[in-house]
Image (tube, grey):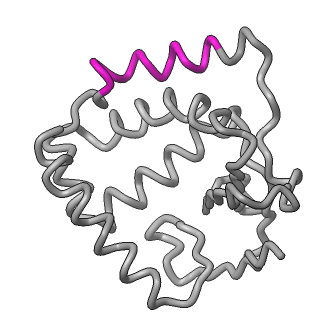
């Protein structure tokens, strides 16, 4: 299956939300449990509203890429990198999200905030997230240290589809 890897943009938010939320919903039972009875379609819709703001936040150090099926135009993978804070030699401009206009930034923030209440995602079990969040993150970090990467998340329908991305940033 031919595919293209390129920088993600706020316009990709619906496809990124579909890819990412579907992947987590069907592969991470802890993540799924935090959403309770909220339908996946609503989780995706809310994520699509929040993603443009997420993509344009911390542009100096975050890089976002997507993998797109050349035949269908469907986003089949996504990866985010956070560049080292202490090394300005690494810039990787090809994966940097374009800077939004002031009005776009304002609109992205408003859309994102519309899907939260007091800083909490709508529909998420905040107590379960707080209880599971940190221990799961610590466990995941330990597991990832022992694995060879890099990794590009993709939906379960493409789980046999492997993408190797060279992330050596030196």
Query: In the drawing, does residue 31 fall left or right of residue 58?
Result: left
**On screen, residue 58 above or below 157:** above
Q: In which quarter of the image is residue 46?
A: top left
Name the residue: 83% across, 76% down: 170
Name the residue: 77% across, 23% down: 100
Magenta span contains residue 86: no
**On screen, residue 49 above or below 87:** above
Residue 21 place in picture, x, y as percent: 42, 50
Name the residue: 67% across, 79% down: 163
**Viewer-side residue, 37 vs 10:** 10
- Part of the protein shown in magenta: 106-119
Query: In the drawing, does residue 155 fall left or right of residue 77?
Result: left
Quadrant placement of the N terminus:
bottom right
Count the marks.
0
Is residue 35 at all visible to an observer of this figure? yes
Is residue 66 at all visible to an observer of this figure? no
Residue 162 place in picture, x, y as percent: 62, 82
Residue 135 place in picture, x, y as percent: 22, 65
Determine the residue located farthest toward the front in the rendered image. 86
**Viewer-side residue, 25 vs 149:** 149
Name the residue: 71% across, 15% down: 104
Query: In the drawing, does residue 90 fall left or right of residue 53?
Result: right
Residue 2 place in picture, x, y as percent: 79, 73
């Amino acid at each position: 299956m031919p595919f293209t890897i390129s920088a993600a943009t706020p316009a990709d938010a619906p496809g990124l939300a579909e890819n990412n939320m579907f992947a987590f919903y069907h592969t991470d039972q802890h993540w799924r449990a935090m959403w309770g009875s909220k339908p996946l379609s609503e989780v995706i819709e809310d994520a699509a509203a929040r993603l443009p703001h997420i993509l344009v936040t911390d542009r100096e150090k975050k890089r976002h890429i997507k993998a797109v099926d050349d035949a269908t135009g469907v986003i089949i993978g996504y990866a985010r990198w956070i560049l080292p804070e202490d090394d300005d030699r690494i810039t990787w401009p090809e994966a940097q999200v374009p800077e939004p206009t002031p009005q776009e930034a304002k609109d992205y923030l408003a859309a994102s905030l519309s899907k939260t209440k007091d800083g909490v995602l709508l529909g998420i079990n905040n107590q379960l997230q707080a209880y599971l969040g940190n221990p799961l993150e610590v466990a995941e970090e330990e597991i990832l240290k022992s694995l060879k990467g890099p990794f590009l998340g993709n939906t379960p329908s493409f789980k046999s589809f492997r993408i190797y991305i060279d992330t050596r940033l030196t």
